[in-house]
Amino acid sequence: MMLRVNLVLLAILVACALSLVTSRHQARKLFVELEREQTQTRAYDVEYGQLQIEQSTWAMPARVERIAREHLRMELPAAGRVEVIDGTPR
Amino acid sequence: MRATASATLQLPRSRAPLLFGGLLAILMLLIGRSLYLQRIDNGFLQEQGSSRYSRNIEVPAHRGRIVDRNGESLAISTPVKAIWAWPEKVETTPEQLKALADALETPVASLSRKLREGGEFVYLKRPVAPEVAERIAALGIAGVHDETEYWRYYPSGDVMSQVLGFTGDHDVGQEGMELAEQSWLGGKPGTRRVIINRRGEVVEDVASIRAPQEGRDLALALDTRLQYLAFRELKAAVESNKAKAGALVVLDVKSGEILALANWPAYNPNSRTRAARERMRNRALTDVFEPGSTLKPFTIAAALDSGRVTPTSIVDTAPGTLTIGSATIHDAHREGVLTVEQVIQKSSNVGAAKIALSLPPSTMWQTLSDAGFGAPPRTGFPGEVGGRLRPAKSWKPIEQATIAYGHGISVNLVQLARGYTLFATDGELKPVSLLKLDGPVAGRPAIAPETARAVRRMLEMVVAPGGTAPKAQVAGYRVAGKTGTAHKLEGRSYTDRYVSSFVGFAPASNPRLIVAVMIDEPSAGQYYGGSVAAPVFSTVMGSALRMLGVPPDAPLSNAILPPENADIREET
């Protein structure tokens, strides 16, 4: 009787030990995955920052003005060519 | 029968216990040693063990962005790579070493020396472009890794360099707003302890020793488009007038926010070679100058407030000079009998001095002090100064007379622009802010509303034909302002070098913006504020009002254009 109980307990112990090993392994695998995803997040962060810099650089008024003047041949009308009109509804 | 048994080998009686005892002693010794190592002297071995599988890794925290009032990025930290190695783990073939050296752009010899002498950890190169870091990673050399760190970029370049400042090592603010708001912007990197596997990959988080704290974004009051406009016009004016330097401030009347603050000469904060200190100074806040005639409205306001004069009171400025003790005050044009309004319009020094001398010094001092002179404008900008306004008790009559037209008192440009909030509002001094605010702020009443309105009318006359600054006119808008042309003080005597300035606001019917322009030592022939600074004011104010969509308030038929060769009348 005692022997049978011991055998059952042993079997449970082995099962527990094995499940501990597997879950530990699972945890490690998931952690590695998490690390990878976090690295990916950081990579996207990097890209976002760089895109922000790029966007700001392209949108700088100095550049916009240069393109408007040189490429599109736009210019500010001289004061004499500006007519101020009254926009208030009557 | 027993005798046959005794025929077997007879060992000495004591031998077995002796052997047993000996083995037991050795066993005890081993147990004792292992207990000693496990329990008592376990530090060394544990350290050795953990150094083989765990590391403290720094978790970087990025610095907050600086953005303008519309969310446009002005300063961004972006991660770049730092290449580092564990020399003891590095195993390379000569080809790999050569490739690594090529990617890092260093000679093979210096690289291998670094790897030999590096100890446990060595930086091979920082910063490195992410593409280069990828190429190095592709080489797959064990023990060579990259790490992310942050580098600051300023897309606007020199346009607002003095306001933003820059960061130094480890992305810590060193100048300007980067320094002033360091604790807000700066991120605090954290540390965590991890377990690594044989390939150097992190396999388990042991503990977070210190959680990283990310930096926060900072919204400035600046408007990038206005700032660029101000910078462009200022730069053009400084260059065409062959001036030493210049500064320009655009202030929102309702909120006191600094919408633009330009300085020339400037520098490019992206270049890591340091520019001259000269170019880094934010002159509008850290330099003082004698304002000259731009201070006259405050004298007149003090006189009107005291009730001693009215806008139409008569002041005799003939013969254009006024002698006090041994000193004589001059007018550039003889004007004769003027009203108080005309003293401002024609900028008469003698007139302003006479009005000032009719006041007790303490009254005048109080008004100037209430207008914010003599104390820093408290923008929080590092190195801002307050200028000099000596206590009224120490004023001699000649000093009171010269302070009336802006000599013997020093101010910075932001202070001067802020002072004009008195006239742009109904007599309130608004606090100025470099940071974006949510809405209008309450000012501190300094002069009576009637006085403010009276001075505002006078300032409008300055820009009208017959005033000193017809070139400050803006088509479609009513403009009010005042010119200034001050002799520069060198040591104790005045020189023939000038500071030309113009401070004004528009639309005069409901002021929205104050623009203050200061040009230091114009030397291309022109030096009057009305011909050097007023045109800059006109361009910046006109474009700014149109950009902000402020409805024109000038009578439509009254879109007078300043005549090209207008007679610029100005006192110095």
Image (tube, rainbow, N blue to C red):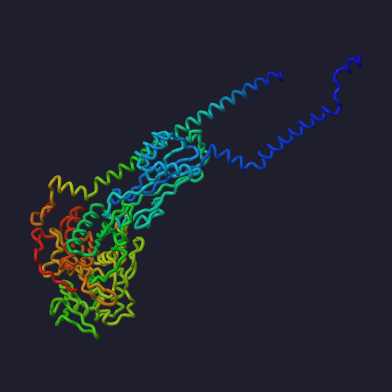
Residue B171 visible from this viewpoint: yes
Above/below status of B515 relative to B333? above
Number of marks: 0
x and y percent of residue B217 in the render?
A: 36, 49
Instruction: Name the residue at 34% across, 77% down.
Output: B391
Left or right: B546 as drawn, with respect to A81: right
Q: Is residue A35 above or below residue B288?
A: above
The quarter of the image holding the N terminus of chain B is top right
Which of the pair B17/B487 is nearer the observer? B17
Left or right: where B214 falls relative to B20: left
Quarter-of-image position of residue B43:
top right
| Residue at left offset 45%, top offset 32% | A33
In the rendering, at what x and y percent does residue B572 appear?
Answer: 19, 74
Q: In which quarter of the view is residue B508 placed? A: bottom left
Q: Quadrant of residue B268?
A: bottom left
Question: Percent x, y for residue B79?
Answer: 37, 44
Can you see residue B305?
A: no
**B371 and B167: which one is in front?**
B167
Residue A30 percent across, percent down from the top left: 47, 31
Up/down of B252 relative to A14, above or below: below
Furthest residue in direction bottom, as rendered: B325
- With B309 as the anchor, is A14 left or right in this view? right
Q: In front here: B120 or B248?
A: B120
Residue at the limit of the structure toward the top, as seen here: B1
